[in-house]
Image (tube, rainbow, N blue to C red):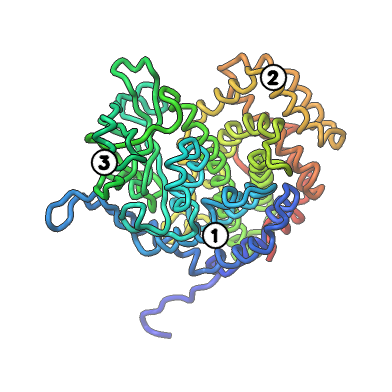
């Protein structure tokens, strides 16, 4: 033995890597087929192998250990407001864009396209989450931009391109484009109606002389944004007032980094945010110094316009949280299967089995819910939206964003604890995953906002309740406890929907009921029975690892991570 060696290293789990993220996840594979996207199995199988490679998984660590850096001026003193990223960030963005994470449902709309994209997003969520932010906004911008035929014709070919092009250039010189958004300001936060940024219509003749006839309807923006996501994006959707008193309401503007005449727009990046997590991604504060933008939608209707974008970004918050849950579960279960304590593997210890199986149930239910929610966004066979699916999506999107994202931090903490000190240090992935969870709950509307949105959806008429009842009825008769739970939920919706104080309880029960219904219909009996016993028969609460007696932990854990 070398005289500097004092011990042999053993009983340490090897890093989780070089795995097929798609093949090892039965819940994802089954959900993909069930929700109408079985045609994407081959492509997702290839993607699962690529993303599960150890070198690809390590890109997440590199991108977060080397966060973006703001460069306000070039060497000659010219204002440039560039954001510099580590090469790992660009590799991750290439993977996302080249695999259509931003574009798949819009390229060739077909039944299951949103579900296929959601399944891919769940896989990407197990690799790195900061890079998903600009991709989500780009994906979600498409319906809003289609409201302006001129911008759509000029920009959508680049937005839907599967070529990642990070260069700072006018759109005409680029092979692909990314879109960000800017809504919140210092004084308002969630209350965007308190925004003070002003937009003033430019003289059309002046605008035409400068930008050309296609861009004569330009506006000049003065103000700020407290959170301006992904400032490196090629354009942003921005909310601004169009009159001094604000009586006209907020309007939505398309604000590019480079103007049609090739000059930089007057968007001044003040600083990058020092965030709890999401370190790889750049979020910023900006000021508009007569920045130029173009109206999207009708004047004064900016909130409804950008909320169409918001419904898709909220879907991605659900997908993002479910993906991180899956990643945390895989790392924890992989560790427990390799690590021994007190004479046997951690994964064989009864109390640890309770914890792991409980986490596995939560992750599978989140995956099933996320894929079902994605189907609400898909067109029917005739290409038209299904009205009942749209109604169901109207409540499941905010409710799911509330409950799944709210469960995330507790899930991450429990998975970290499975790994003990090895989970708590920055050398492993659990610390990063834990820090990623809260942003999905906060971004695009915090928990209270989501729950109030659920109330608004139910207040619009009985059709929304009917859509939920139809979904839950598909699982009726399989478990008396589930049937009773759903009856109480449906009978009490009128009362609960009028009770703002209890809105969180309604959203939670709604999601748990839908999850239980999906598992009762489609999951193995051991999974469905354990979920009902631990989430329906009793109130959800407290720590994970509180499953009742009689749960088949071995079967649940064998399904949770197939080796």
Mark 2 secondary-structure assignment: helix
Residue 382 sits in quarter? top right
Q: Residue furthest right?
A: 477
CA gap, disc 1 to disc 2? 41 Å
What percent of the width, then of the height, locates residue 40?
67, 58
Q: Which mark is residue 455?
A: none
Query: Is residue 53 visible in this depiction of the protein?
Result: yes
What percent of the width, then of the height, locates residue 331?
57, 58
Query: Is residue 545 visible in this depiction of the protein?
Result: no
Residue designated by label 1: 99
Foreground mark, 3 or 2, reads: 3
What percent of the width, then of the height, locates residue 109?
63, 48
Other residues around mark 3 within 10 Å, as few (<14) / some (14–19) / many (≥20): many
Q: Is label 1 in contact with label 2 (beta carbons under 8 Å)?
A: no
Other residues around mark 1 within 10 Å, as few (<14) / some (14–19) / many (≥20): some
Q: Is label 1 in contact with label 3 (beta carbons under 8 Å)?
A: no
Mark closest to the chain's N terminus, 3 or 2: 3
Q: Is label 3 in contact with label 2 (beta carbons under 8 Å)?
A: no
Q: Which mark is residue 267?
A: 3
Residue designated by label 2: 493
Q: Is residue 345 above or below residue 147?
A: below
């Amino acid at each position: 033995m070398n005289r500097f060696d004092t011990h042999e290293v053993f009983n340490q789990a090897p890093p989780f890597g070089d795995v097929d993220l798609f093949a090892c996840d039965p819940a994802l594979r089954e959900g993909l087929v069930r929700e109408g996207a079985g045609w994407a199995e081959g492509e997702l199988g290839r993607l699962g192998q690529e993303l599960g490679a150890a070198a690809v998984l390590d890109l997440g660590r590199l991108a977060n250990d080397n966060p973006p850096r703001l460069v306000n001026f070039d060497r000659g003193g010219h204002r440039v407001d560039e954001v510099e990223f580590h090469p790992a960030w660009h590799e991750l963005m290439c993977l996302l864009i080249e695999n259509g994470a931003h574009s798949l449902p819009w390229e060739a709309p077909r039944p299951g396209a949103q579900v296929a994209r959601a399944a891919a997003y769940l896989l990407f969520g197990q690799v790195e989450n900061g890079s998903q932010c600009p991709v989500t906004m780009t994906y979600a911008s498409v319906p809003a931009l289609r409201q302006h035929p001129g911008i759509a014709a000029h920009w959508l070919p680049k937005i839907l391109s599967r070529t990642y092009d990070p260069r700072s250039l006018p759109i005409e010189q680029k092979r692909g484009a990314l879109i960000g958004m800017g809504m919140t300001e210092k004084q308002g936060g969630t209350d965007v109606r308190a925004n003070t940024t002003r937009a003033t219509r430019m003289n059309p003749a002046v605008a035409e002389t400068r930008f050309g006839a296609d861009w004569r309807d330009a506006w000049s923006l003065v103000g700020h944004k407290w959170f301006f996501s992904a400032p490196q994006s090629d354009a942003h959707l921005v909310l601004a007032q169009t009159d001094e008193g604000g009586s006209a309401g907020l309007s939505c503007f398309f604000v590019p980094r480079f103007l049609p005449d090739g000059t930089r727009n007057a968007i001044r990046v003040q600083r990058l945010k020092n965030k709890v997590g999401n370190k790889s991604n750049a979020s910023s504060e900006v000021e508009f110094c007569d920045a130029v933008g173009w109206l999207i939608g009708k004047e004064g209707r900016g909130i409804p316009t950008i909320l169409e974008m918001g419904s898709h970004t909220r879907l991605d918050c659900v997908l993002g949280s479910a993906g991180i849950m899956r990643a945390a579960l895989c790392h924890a279960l992989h560790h427990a299967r390799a690590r021994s304590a007190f004479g046997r593997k951690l994964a064989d210890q009864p109390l640890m089995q309770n914890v792991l199986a409980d986490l596995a149930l939560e992750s599978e239910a989140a995956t099933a819910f996320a894929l079902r929610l994605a189907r609400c966004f898909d067109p029917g066979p005739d290409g038209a939206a299904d009205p009942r699916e749209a109604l169901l999506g109207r409540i499941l999107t905010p409710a799911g964003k509330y409950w799944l994202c709210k469960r995330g931090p507790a899930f991450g903490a429990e998975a970290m604890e499975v790994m003990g000190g090895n989970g708590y240090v920055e050398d492993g992935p659990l610390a990063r995953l834990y820090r990623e969870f809260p942003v999905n709950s906060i971004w695009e509307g915090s928990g209270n906002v989501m729950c109030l949105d659920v109330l608004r959806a139910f207040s619009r008429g009985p059709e929304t309740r009917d859509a939920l009842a139809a979904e839950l009825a598909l699982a009726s008769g399989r478990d008396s406890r589930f049937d009773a739970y759903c009856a109480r939920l449906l009978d009490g919706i009128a009362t609960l929907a009028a009770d703002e104080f209890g809105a969180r309880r309604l959203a939670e029960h709604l999601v748990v009921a839908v999850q239980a219904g999906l598992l009762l219909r489609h999951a193995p009996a051991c999974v469905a029975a354990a979920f009902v016993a631990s989430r329906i028969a009793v109130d959800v609460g407290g720590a994970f690892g509180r499953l009742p007696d009689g749960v088949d932990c071995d079967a649940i854990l064998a399904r949770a991570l197939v080796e």
